[in-house]
Amino acid sequence: MTQSPIPPVDAKAVVELARELIRIPSVAGREGGEQAAAELVARTMSGFGWRPHLTEVAPGRTNVVATVDGGGGPGPTLALEGHLDVVTEGDRTAWTVDPFGAEIRDGRLYGRGAADMKAGVAAMLHGARALQRSGSFPGRLRLLALCDEEGMMLGAKRAVADGHLEGVSGVIICEPEGGEICPSSKGALRLRFDLAGRMAHGAMPELGRSPIPVASSLIQELAEVQAALQRDPGAHPTLGMAYLTPTVVVAGSLDQMNVSPARATLAVDVRTIPGVDHARLLEDLRSRCARLGRTHEVAIELTVIDDRPPVEIGAEEPLLLALGRAHSELWGHSAPLGGVPGTTDGTIITRDTGIPTVVYGPGGKWIAHQADEFVEVEEIPRYADTYARAAQIFLSGPAA
Ligand SMILES: [Zn+2]
């Protein structure tokens, strides 16, 4: 099938959509926010002649999904994905602009979610529209604008459960990666250790079983586990090292300094790279807990709050090649391959379906969640054009 050249996206319209999305404070839990963003996306899709499918995942938190059939005969399905929620603006005095004002200054569009990731959502919608306007193409596109990425990724989990990824051959996650194409993402485990011993008077500690020194031993063992992982598998070329970081320690009470407490709780944020097997890591941690518990007569319970494996797709994956070729054509230079330091909805999609996901989108990698978050205005239509071209290459097959 011959490929029609794709007309450039309407730059004004895609930037205006990003600005409208930024003006909606879609912070999790803030009245109306996420829902209003979902409704704006649905209206935009309807305006393009698509049929958006809305699913309320939790009260006021909605997924929006649409399918654009190419009309050019059989072919794969490519999904483009973005999330609608943003993190809080935090301390407003740290901002030099209104966090929800969508102000443009010196070629930069400012606001919470400018990079993470309302520019990406606007670009994927207009990119898909541009490909559709260029004529028929094989297969189809699926657009996924999901809720709750910044929390427990309920939107991605629900999209998988609802079957929206069935038959999909690849997913572009339109998160900000500063011009890099990212085929790998770090994994994450959120762990909670509850230690239970026996309370005692601070004057007679020998009558109790304090969990505090045991928590301290456990923290030391976590450091040993981290050191072992940093030796093997060592450093990943784009993701760096694995880390086990204690982030919360709770025990005793400052009002009761003469009481040796019965309980302590430790939370640990684990970040992993390909080559670290989560099941084996958890088994190791459980056996360490059991041994420490026996030695000190303190029960240690390990709870896995969340388990997101590292993601890495192969260098020959057609989606990676299509994105690389489209980027080179439109930007005049090849995009470096990078790694995502955090996790994305793509982590959940690959974990639960095995479908390859690649992360690539407008905005700097490090600007997300900061004050004065911004995206370069000219990047937004450029990414939209790149998505359209990458989709055309991917759906038409490598020979095209
Ligand atoms: Zn994001």
Image (cartoon, rainbow, N blue to C red):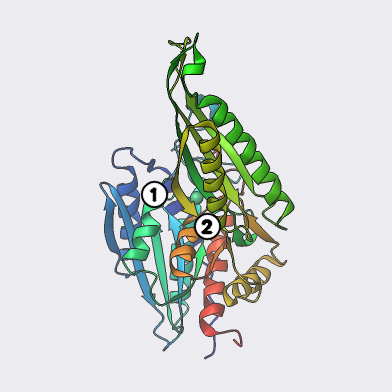
The disc at residue 148 is: 1
Residue 25 at x, y percent in the picture:
38, 40
Residue tagged 2? 279
Label located before the other in sequence (2 or 1): 1
Residue in front for this viewpoint, 394 or 183:
183
**Where 257 falls versus 395 (above or below)?**
above
In this view, the residue in front, 135 or 27, is: 27
> Neighbour class for label 1 at 10 Å: few (<14), some, many (≥20)?
many
| Circle 1 SS class | loop
Give the foreground label among 2 and 1: 2
- Residue extending farthest bottom: 1
Among the 4 quarters of the image, the one containing residue 322? bottom right
Q: Give the image location of residue 351, x and y in percent.
A: 48, 63
Residue drawn at x 54%, y 78% is: 394
Q: Please tell me how crowded label 2 is: few (under 14), some (14-19), or many (20+) other residues with Cα within 10 Å.
A: few
Q: Quadrant of residue 334?
A: bottom right
Question: Within the image, what quadrant is residue 245 found in?
Answer: top right
Disc marking residue 20: none
- Residue 344 in picture, x, y percent from top left: 50, 55
Q: Amino acid at mark 1?
A: Asp
Please indicate whether residue 372 sits to the left or right of residue 195 in the image: right
Q: CA distance from mark 2 to mark 1?
A: 26 Å
In the image: residue 54, left or right of residue 169: left
In this orientation, does residue 122 appear?
Answer: no
